[in-house]
């Protein structure tokens, strides 16, 4: 796959993002790193998911702020990776949600919330979890730089998660099973971090919980389901409101174990029909 096929605008949405009764525009674009190509040696390339907010300026638009989420392994040979952008739309200004999940032997998943204050995108909250066969780490976002480390190649090393504060670190011996108490603490830490930005998860994407993907018989189907769930399929607002899916990118393996990439734009209202 050529890098140019991953470069460009993925989605745009126009609404009042800061509650000032004027319209702003949010755009989402993909920006692969220099020299990007699908890797087959276990190394990961990075793709940046860039979120930009524009204010009206005369007859045009002026960039107010932008942030980038760094997504390694999309769509390299080995990892299954999905990242989506959605809005929690209720009373007041909406919250922008960057939701991700991936698997490459281990599993990682989380959600970062952003708000726009009229001049900049600010952190509204966030949670990030990493699961190894004998370890669980759960973190809460401390700054917008958390978007730059959604996934780390050395996740269990101290200090490897920039912008994140650790709220849970559970380890157990090789050959042992994860305990019910550990899973309960994992769920509580995850739910607590999500609640801080007014979000709840109806289907935590943990490999240790049977509830997620239980309708799938094969292991790969279950993993692919977890990694490609749309935000509205598992997230909801704790105080009401609607989770509106905007766009995403998902890298999965098909039945022939060939890696594929889907670029996803959700438009249930049909606003983009005239441009198709």
Image (spheres, rainbow, N blue to C red):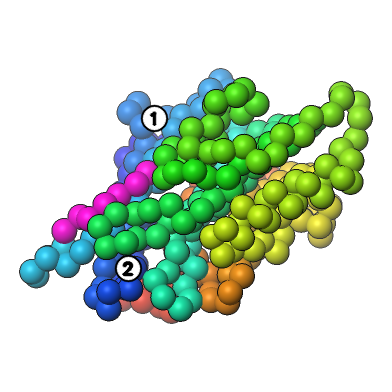
> Of all residues shown, which one is farthest toward the right?
176
Residue 60, compared with residue 216, is above or below; it is below
Chain part drawn in magenta: 62-70
Q: Residue at x 44, y 60 (%)?
A: 96
Task: Name the foreground residue: 161 vs 203.
Answer: 161
Q: Residue at x 34, y 68 (%)?
A: 17
**Magenta segment: does it hold 68?**
yes
Q: Of the numbered discs in the image, which one, if any, rests on residue 217? A: none
What's the distance in space between the residues labelled 1 and 2, CA to CA?
A: 36 Å
Horizontal side of 92 relative to 102 (left or right) equals: left
Which residue in the structure is indicated by mark 1? 36
Task: Name the foreground residue: 49 vs 6.
Answer: 49
Q: Residue at x 60, y 24 (%)?
A: 158
Horizontal side of 14 relative to 149 (left or right) equals: left
Which residue in the structure is indicated by mark 2? 18
Spot occupied by residue 59 in the image (x, y as percentages of width and height) = 9, 70
Viewer-nearest of discs 1 and 2: 2
**Magenta segment: does it hold 218?**
no
Q: Is residue 130 visible?
A: yes
């Amino acid at each position: 796959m050529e890098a140019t096929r991953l470069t460009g605008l993925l989605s745009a949405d126009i609404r009042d993002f800061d509650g000032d009764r004027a319209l702003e525009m949010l755009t989402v674009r993909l920006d692969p790193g220099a020299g990007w190509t699908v890797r087959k040696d276990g190394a990961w390339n990075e793709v940046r998911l860039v979120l930009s907010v524009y204010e009206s300026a005369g007859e045009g638009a002026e960039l107010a702020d932008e942030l980038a989420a760094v997504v390694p392994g999309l769509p390299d040979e080995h990892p299954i990776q999905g990242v989506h952008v959605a809005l929690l739309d209720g009373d007041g200004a909406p919250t922008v949600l960057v939701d991700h999940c991936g698997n490459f032997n281990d599993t990682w998943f989380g959600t970062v919330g952003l708000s726009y204050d009229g001049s900049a995108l600010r952190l509204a909250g966030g949670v990030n979890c990493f699961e190894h066969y004998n370890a669980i780490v759960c973190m809460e976002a401390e700054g917008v730089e958390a978007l730059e480390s959604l996934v780390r190649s050395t996740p269990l090393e101290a200090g490897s998660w920039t912008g994140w504060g650790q709220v849970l670190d559970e380890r157990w011996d090789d050959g042992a099973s994860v305990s019910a108490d550990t899973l309960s603490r994992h769920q509580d830490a995850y739910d607590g971090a999500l609640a801080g930005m007014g979000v709840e998860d109806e289907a935590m994407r943990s490999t240790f919980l049977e509830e997620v993907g239980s309708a799938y018989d094969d292991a790969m189907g279950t993993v692919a389901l977890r990694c490609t769930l749309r935000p509205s399929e598992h997230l909801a607002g704790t105080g009401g409101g609607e989770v509106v899916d905007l766009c995403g990118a998902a890298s999965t393996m098909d039945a022939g174990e060939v890696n594929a990439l889907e670029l996803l734009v959700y438009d249930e209202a049909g606003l983009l029909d005239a441009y198709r």
